[in-house]
Amino acid sequence: MAWGNEVWPTGQTAWNTYIEWKIKEYGENSCYVQVKYSSYVKCGDMRGTIVNRSWGGQYRMYGPGWYGDSGWLDVGWVNYGDPVTRECSAWYTGYSGTFRKSTCRDTFKPSAPVWTPQTPSNAKAVRKSQTLNVVTWTRNTTAARPYDGIYVDRQTDGGEWVNIAKPGGDKTEYSDDTVRPNHTYRYRIGAYNTAGNAGGHSYTETLRNPPEKPAAPSGAKVERLNDEKNLITWANHAMDEAPYSEVRIERSTDGGGSVQIAHVSGSASSYTDPTCSADHYYRYLVRAYNESGYSERVMTDRTFNTPSAPFKPSGQRTGDTSVELTIPNLSRTASATEIQRSRDRKDWTTIATVTGKALSFGDNPGGGTFYYRARNLRGSLVSAWSEPSEAIVTICAPAAPTLLTPTSGEVLLVSQGRVTFTWHHNPIDGSAQSAAEVQYSTDGTAWKTVTAATAQSASVPNFPLNSTVYWRVRTKGVHADFGPWSGNSSFHVRQPPQLAFDAPGQTVRNVPVGVSVQYVDASGALAAMAVAITDMGGNVLYEEALGTSTATSVTKDEWMPEDGGEYRIVATARSTSGLQSTASMPFRVEFELPRRASLRIEADIERGYAELQCIVDNNDEGQDVESLSIWRVTRDGERLIASDLSDGSSVVDRYAPLNTEYSYRVAAYAASGASRATEHPGSIKTPYCFVYYGDGLMARAQFDPTEQRSLERANRTLVRYAGRAYPVLYDAGGISDTRPLTAHVIGEEEVRAFEDLILYPRAIFKSVAGDVFHVAADVSVNRDLCMPTTHADISLSLTRVDGEAL
């Protein structure tokens, strides 16, 4: 603000002009300036003097105060720090002709405000070396948003942001010389001034310093786990700046060149090689790897696997009792070979262990038949045995033959015409059978002899019933002597048991089903019997083990045959002789009907009920009645009223139709499942209609009740369309059945029964026309108070609703 020169028209009066500045709006680099001109009477009284002003027009001045205010006048946008000058004047000429004037001149230089800085932009980071990254950015300053300084923050390996430098606000570059190998770095740039921090940061991309080349592992060892697996271990020497990305394993097989077989994580210190196999030896080389390259290799010792087995030895007799063996042996890891000999290829004896890989061997086993086999060794590792050699034979008598048939303890049928003995010749020297002798006896002391040549069988006539026969054989090969007799074997000659059915007969008329079997056995006694009942297709429906019993009774709970069904009974018996027989017989089921049953029916016209009592005619022929069932038969079908009833049982049918003809069917059932049904007419003639509700509650109306019925399609819609003569029908189904009913009732109890009906959401209605169905009921009661007893007109609105069959 500025004051102009003071004007003193009198010694007691003084005034001057005045300039005032204001900033209306601040911008980033300039502000919008306004100026205001006025005059001020400092003292005295100007008495309404008219004053001219340079900002236009005139005004009057009086006593002390402000006059001629121009209001705020726009100067415009002025850059911060640039000067703007304005001048104003006010003047007048007095009555004496004296000219008075006050002039004010002022220069205004606006200062910039300080606002929070804008975020720097275009932050970039460049890796110069393993230990130097250079970060650059672009300043985004204005006069109102200067930078006092810069924040340089760094994020290492994706961790927290940490401030590492605060260069001056005029800087656009920073060199970070604190970085290390094998780390990632990201930078963000912020700005600050006295008003605060910039609202955001400018972020660089992530830079990564690669690691140093890894140091070599040490202490590499190999341990054999089995022929398929070796365990390789080593010590890691990874460092933060020279980590192991991987450890790579190479293998040399049987002394050959090394080939990489695996790579594992850099933290691993072992590897199991699952690709090994028997009869090989291995050596492993281990080295570390990261993106900067490989370490030196470190090597394990050799490890050997189980040697492979020799191939089948071959041999020849070089003298009467001497043998020379040739052993094909290709093992790579064998350090010794074990050789065994056997007379029968079952029991083996070690005869030598040869150092190194044996390829031949000489032996003097004596006379007989011999087999040889070999296996390779390496310490505790042992190969499989080779396949045994072929027999190498010296001449000798055969061993005792093996008896084949009849087997020991076998039972032969007496009906069999002849008995054939068979055996197996067992030569020691490999020569074929040239002769044989068969001996048999029925008492174990007196023997009969049958001879044979090269055939290993002989046939004789069968023996008497219930005989026990002992037999033995000896054979001869190229040697002049027979071999020893075989051990004695025995068999039996028997007759199988005979079976016949005493029960059931060919027709079964009742349950339980009795079963009885005749058993005849000339060679023993009954050891066990079982019976089964099957359908005609052979499917088993019932079976029972009887032990030594020959009879049983099959109850209906165990198996219930169908009336008219055809079945087969099967009996299987095993004798103490060891023989077994089976017999079967078909039969048919024709059950006898139960006794006849009837109903005693009494109609209760006051309640609309029918009381039913079952009566069985015990003088009638037929099976005993086990249970009874009752159905109501109407024009709409059948409804089961009760089941599992007995003679004399009573049942109340609450929902029997009124004033229409219907009937009851009562069925009697026997234990066999056979049934007999009888029909009995039913009728309830009553002037009442009934509404049943709640738990046994009832309302009724008499005196010529009237009843209407309104039937509608519940979900039908007719829609007319332009161009069609008739509407289109849409019907979602369903029927609406509404019946208004009016009646006159007498008696307080009768009236209250209808009034209470509204307390229940649903009821069952029985009309005088024979309809019975579920309803939702609304009631209107109009009492006649002029009558000496309670009279009322009843109006019912009945809507038929869905519900269970009645």
Image: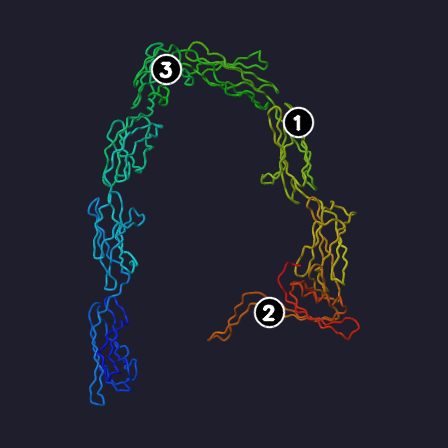
Q: Nearer the viewer, mark 2 or mark 3?
A: 2
Is label 2 in a helix, a strand or a loop?
Answer: strand
Residue 407, image x and y in percent? Answer: 53, 21
Q: Nearer the viewer, residue 64 or 231?
A: 64
Q: In this view, does 101 lie above or below 625?
A: below
Is label 3 in a helix, a strand or a loop?
Answer: strand
Query: Can residue 430 be seen at all in this image of the molecule?
Result: no
Q: Mark 2 points at which residue?
A: 712
The earlier-in-sequence mark between 1 and 2 is 1
- Say whether residue 798 is left or right of residue 32: right
Query: Can residue 315 be seen at all in this image of the molecule?
Result: yes
| Mark 1, other Cα within 10 Å: few <14 / some 14–19 / many ≥20 | some
Q: Mark 1 points at which residue?
A: 520
The earlier-in-sequence mark between 1 and 3 is 3
Q: Which quarter of the figure is the N terminus placed in?
A: bottom left
Q: Mark 3 points at which residue?
A: 392
- Say whether residue 583 is left or right of residue 158: right
Q: Does the CB distance between marks 1 and 3 fall below 8 Å?
A: no
Q: Which of 593 and 435 is in front in this view?
A: 593
Q: Which image quadrant is residue 785 in?
A: bottom right
- Say whether residue 506 is left or right of residue 82: right
Tell me the kind of residue under disc 3.
Answer: Ile
